[in-house]
Image (cartoon, rainbow, N blue to C red):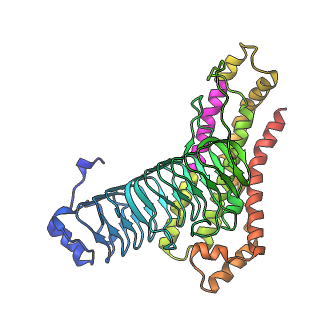
Amino acid sequence: MNENEYSYYNPAQLRKFQEHGVIIPDLSSVRIGREVAFDKIAAGSTLQPFVRINGANTEIQAGANIGLFGPVTLDNSWIGENAVIGSLGAVTLKDTVVGPESILGSGVAEQAVLLGKETKVNAFSTGYGFRIRKGSLYEEDASSAQHTDTKMTVLFPWTTLGSNINFCDVLLAGGTAPEPGYFSEVGSGTIHFNFSIRGDKATASLFGDVSSGVFLDQQRLFIGGNNSLLGPIKADFGAMTAADVRINGAFSAGLNFGHSLPKGKIAYDPRIFLGALGIVKKQVNVLAELTALFHWYQQIRIACLAQTPQQKFIYESGLRMVELNHQERLSQLQRFIDAVDNSLSLTLKTETVSKKEIVEQKLLLQRWPDIQKQLSVLANFALTVPQTLLNNITEQQTQGNSVYTKLIQKLSQEGKQSGKQWLNTITEKVRNVFVEEIKKGE
């Protein structure tokens, strides 16, 4: 259905929303599609002037303030309790879930999920000019400042992006608190380059990991301002970079100064791929972490921690973003494999590529269908959650700890360690699929 096909309630019908308890200061400037049921907009929510709401799946919870300082369009989007949409100007949300207490400044989001705010240390979830695209998952208190762009991006609790940032195809973990100096941070002006010079996107990067990162007890990562991040990158917890540097490959805890390229030029044919086996191995590592995150959402967040229907819905929405990221990585790997196939046909006609590289590419092409088939089924890697962790979670809930980040941090070392081992085993199972299938062809 396009915009012109929508049918809207008239002002007299809008009064029924007011009678239901919805605050609408100016009936003449608010438009609500007839497909939006009266009970989908909760009493105590506010629809400011120049708000337009469409989509049968749209739902607004109590206390939400829509269009505070600018026109807002909601299309099949879910807004949690006390969320503020448009704190700095116009906002458009399509197929997006915004968790409770979130504060969105001005911008657009589509097929994205923000789990909400649990603290007031940071006064915003997004600033001015945000662009949150398909597959973006902002976990509790994750935030972005002015003019940021994310797509297929997972931000763990408390992580934050500065201003003028493009950060797509990335998972960012780390940090132990929402206060400055404790959360993982990406400095202003930084770009994660997620297209290679060959045009492929087998370039997703990991800053931290899932297995330890979900327990919110790891050293933060700090990416300096105006960095050029060349995916795929693997950064350890505690890694920092100086401002205005070029980073690629792997970097470890401590201050990293990056490197510059030598001057001059070389002969280069972008159709010929080198190091293909290693590139795929790195992307399988990303798939392994996403698989672990899938099971964390499914077996911990949804099965154990969700205490209300709203919370369960939000976690299920987050799980859907994890699945989208997993599907995206497999899709991009398939495109990469197709390009390697084409590269091999060219490589066989030249003597500039080593025999080792040719053998590896043939092996990769031979084994990839079986690898892809196994990796695509997330349920293949399910493992029973250790009872130690489950008991620990129940103990915290019995003591009245229900806030996600606080509950996780209060888990015992024994509970956390058993959880980390559980998730690490899942990631190893994924990596071993690749290793074992490649061995079969050798």
Find residue 378 and report its horizontal and vertical position in percent: 66, 53
Q: Which of 178 and 290 is in front in this view?
A: 178
Q: What stretch is highlighted in magenta?
A: 324-341
Find residue 235 and report its horizontal and vertical position in percent: 69, 50
**Residue plotted at (61% across, 76% down):** 406
Residue 337 counted in the magenta span: yes
Find residue 374 and report its horizontal and vertical position in percent: 70, 45
Quarter of the image where one finds residue 68? bottom left
Q: Main secondary structure of the magenta part?
A: helix
- Vertical relation: 359 (above or below) 201: above
Q: Can residue 9 be spotted in the picture?
A: yes
**Residue plotted at (62% across, 22% down):** 271
Quarter of the image where one finds residue 345? top right
**Residue plotted at (78% across, 63% down):** 421
Find residue 27 and report its horizontal and vertical position in percent: 18, 67
Q: Can residue 77 be spotted in the picture?
A: no
